[in-house]
Image (cartoon, helix red, strand yellow):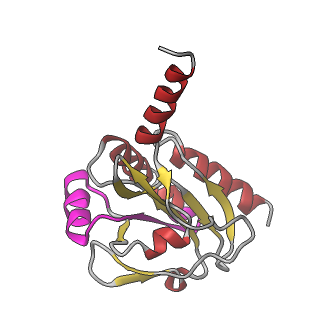
Amino acid sequence: MRPTQPFLLLLLILVLVSPVVLAGAMPAVGDKAPAFTLPSQEGPPVTLEQNRGKWVVLYFYPKDMTPGCTIEAHNFQRDLEKYTKANAVVLGVSLDSVDSHKEFCTKESLSFKLLSDADRKVTGAYGSLASYLGREVASRNTFLIDPAGVIRKVYVKVSPSAHSEAVLADLGKLHASK
């Protein structure tokens, strides 16, 4: 094996296993959050506009009923009362169908809204569309949007287990700075 072969093999493995970002530019802190209208597991579409006046935790996740996504959802559910007290709503977004979201919420006792972005437009607008092992998924990114619709914090490639606590801590700091 030539010296460059192990490097090329490692590079090939990383390309095949790592998510590849397919979306456009990710909105940044200070940007107006891209508007959206998406169906939820509860039926009626959910819009960013209908949450005006509240903080919005808009989190993108790869797939219903997978280990990391279940941990992340359980932690948001566990902390839901804290979000409510902070005038915040939690909205999860994946490319999964409404029916998949219904099943996930029933199985895992989730009471916040999960939004279906089957046409990938919203996930793309938030720079969170990726390819993983040859299939499109939402990257595990979160946007903390203030009551006026401005992005105040962006979390990229988050760790599912500690994410809710980090968002709550930042939400507390942002409340204190107002």
Residue 85 painted magenta: yes
Q: Quadrant of residue 111?
A: bottom left
What residue is shown at x 58% (from left), y 78% (from top)? 34
Q: Is residue 118 above or below residue 130?
A: below
The quadrant of the image that shows the C terminus is bottom right
Q: From which residue to which does the magenta span run?
A: 84-110
Q: Quadrant of residue 80?
A: bottom left
Residue 163 on image: x %, y %: 53, 45
Residue 172 on image: x %, y %: 68, 55
Q: Looking at the picture, tell me which residue is in the foreground, 90 or 61.
A: 61
Question: In the rendered view, does 135 fall on the left or right side of 102?
Answer: right
Residue 37 painted magenta: no
Residue 38 on image: x %, y %: 39, 79
Q: Looking at the picture, tell me which residue is in the foreground, 15 or 126.
A: 15
Question: In the rendered view, does 1 fall on the left or right side of 150?
Answer: left
What residue is shown at x 73% (from left), y 54% (from top)? 173
Residue 100 on image: x %, y %: 22, 63
Q: Looking at the picture, tell me which residue is in the foreground, 65 or 73.
A: 65
